[in-house]
Image (cartoon, rainbow, N blue to C red):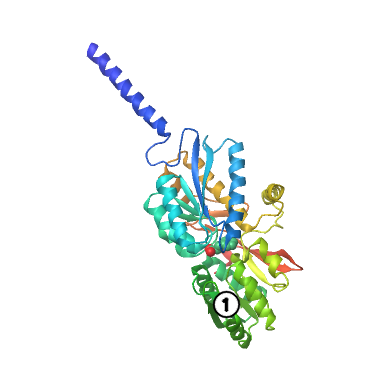
Amino acid sequence: MRNALTLLIALAAVTFVVLAGCKDQGNEAGSGGVTEDSVKLGLFVSTTGAIADFGLATKNGADIAVSEINAAGGINGKQVELVFYDIASKPEEAKSAATKLATQDKVLVGMGAVASSLSLTAAPTFQTNGVPMVSPSSTFPPVTEKGDLIFRICFTDEFAGAALAQFAFEDLGKRKAAIIMNQDDPYSTGLANYFKARFEQLGGKVETTEKFANNTSDFNTQVDNVKSATPDIVFAPVYYNDITLIGQQLRGKGVTVPILGSDGWESPTLLKNAAKDLEGCYFGNHYSQNDPDEMVQGFIKTYADKHGDKPSSLAALGYDVVYFVKNAVDKAGTFDRAKVAGAMRNTKDLKGVTGTYTIDNKRNASKPITMLKITGGKVEMVRQIMPEEVK
Ligand code: PHE
């Protein structure tokens, strides 16, 4: 009897110690970023450097989602603590932010980067350390091929390139394209290839593909070659800083046909600097500010009240990525990273500001692309192209 009692007391003590141990770390095996009353989520984007506009907007959007979530009680009862690193538009900074987030801060999930080239250098570090990474906006297909913990909540360039080619061929009736692309940027070269493949499959012809290197500001050679190819459309899958100069220089040499771009054109400075040169041009993007949807308009209002201007698609994706993580933790019912990643893989019909999306078996979001037109110094929505429309 005494022995049984001693055994019971010993068992109770062990159970207490084990439970207390768990509570101290506030987590079970494999879980991440959890303290007594908070959960840490990492954010790594560029708020300085060549593409600072992208990261500033993303962070603003993410901050709004975090405030809303915390005001409503947090994620799974824990307040969200955002651990932020500016990766300064540099691949080596992206890698070092990934290392810090995964091994020092031990976040539950890393959210970033925007530019595909930067996500590519960060992804392997997250994968090796067992920390899920979700890019809000990197569209280059190989990003999510870095491992089964790497996700994106945006469409891929494979989809965007094909959708843009169909738009040029079918909606605009164009047959002769010229491409200008950044040979050093995987996002740019990827889109150029996907566009060409679909445009030519439809019966169009890409007359010339003009390449330039990072940090080019004189596009004379490329513009001359485009001009002599006499295209009826120019495809420029480049970032906003480059299209500003390319637009100016094409118009300066009398090339007046529409220019078509993708999400990289998105920036608050685009219309300020290039509205005249890009009048009548089109680009594909992740959402439209004209979308009457209540959730979209609600987010636009909150953002505008706080920042004075309307949110870009980067801000919308920054907002959506935080809710994507929340949804996965809610579904998993735990902060166990592997289970959270499992819930991410099973995400279906999740509504965001950037549309309703499903994560496919390659951990990419299947969702529409929104075609926008620059007209009268403003951006207007032309139409959405749905995933099932694109071959
Ligand atoms: N899709 C771009 C890339 O992968 C980044 C981007 C997203 C830029 C959205 C602007 C808007 O590099």
What residue sits right under mark 1 in the picture? 180
Can residue 149 be seen here? no
Place of residue 35 in the rendered image (x, y in percent of width and height, measured from the top left): 46, 36
Horizontal arrangement in the rendering, residue 103 relative to residue 190 (left or right)? left
For the point 67% across and 59% down, the residue is: 288
Q: From what the image shows, is residue 202 above or below residue 78?
A: below
Which of the two residues, 97 or 380, is positioned nearer the viewer here? 97
Q: From what the image shows, is residue 157 above or below residue 25?
A: below
Q: Indicate the quadrant of ligand 1 in the picture.
A: bottom right
Quadrant location of the N terminus?
A: top left
For the point 43% across and 57% down, the residue is: 95
Place of residue 101 in the rendered image (x, y in percent of width and height, measured from the top left): 44, 48
Figure label count: 1
Quadrant location of the C terminus?
A: bottom right
Can residue 363 be seen here? yes
Give, as a three-letter code, the residue at label 1: Ile
Place of residue 155 in the rendered image (x, y in percent of width and height, measured from the top left): 55, 61
Toward which corner of the image does residue 237 lie, by quadrant? bottom right
Place of residue 96 in the rendered image (x, y in percent of width and height, measured from the top left): 43, 55
Q: Secondary structure at mark 1?
A: strand
Q: Within 8 Å: ligand 1 and the Cβ of disc 1?
A: no
For the point 43% across and 34% down, the residue is: 26
Question: Is disc 1 surrounded by few (<14), some (14 to 19) or many (20+) residues within 10 Å?
Answer: many
